[in-house]
Image (spheres, grey):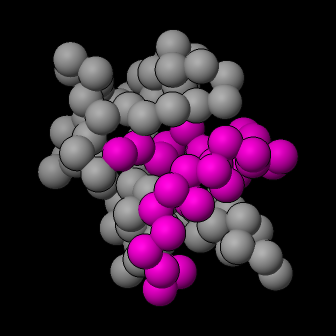
Amino acid sequence: MNFNERCYKILKKVPMGKVTTYKEIAKALRSKAYRAVGNAMNRNPYAPKVPCHRVVKNDGNIGGFASGTKKKIQMLKKEGIIIEKGKINLDKYIYLLN
């Protein structure tokens, strides 16, 4: 299984209404390749089954999305996640993978 496929396998664990970070996925892979995780999310061929919209930056910022940031925000809000000033409260919504 290649790096991207391992990222997707881990991401499938994140439930609706929660988010994780690029860093959390990298940690779960025993890696520090946060940017590579972001690249894997951008190339996700399994969306929405593999919910790459649930991956945000370590500081709670939304981060990028292949379909555009507006679409990512819409999807997160639909799952009940509150976004204030472009950020998500990770204390409330984080799903830790380790």
In what quadrant of the picture does the C terminus appear?
A: bottom left
Q: In the rendered structure, does residue 45 fall within the stretch colored magenta?
A: yes
Is 81 left, or right, of 15 in this rendering?
A: left
Residue positioned most to the bottom: 30
Vertical side of 89 occupied by 34: above or below: below
> In x, y percent, where is residue 16?
50, 45
| Residue at 47% over, 86% down | 30
In what quadrant of the picture does the N terminus appear?
A: bottom right
| Residue at 79% over, 76% down | 2
Vertical side of 88 occupied by 43: above or below: below
> In x, y percent, where is residue 77?
42, 22
Is residue 15 something one can see in this rendering?
no
Is residue 69 something one can see in this rendering?
yes
Is 73 left, or right, of 2 in this rendering?
A: left
- Magenta region, residue range: 28-57
Vertical side of 35 occupied by 74: above or below: above
The image quarter containing residue 96 is: bottom left
> In x, y percent, where is residue 90?
22, 47
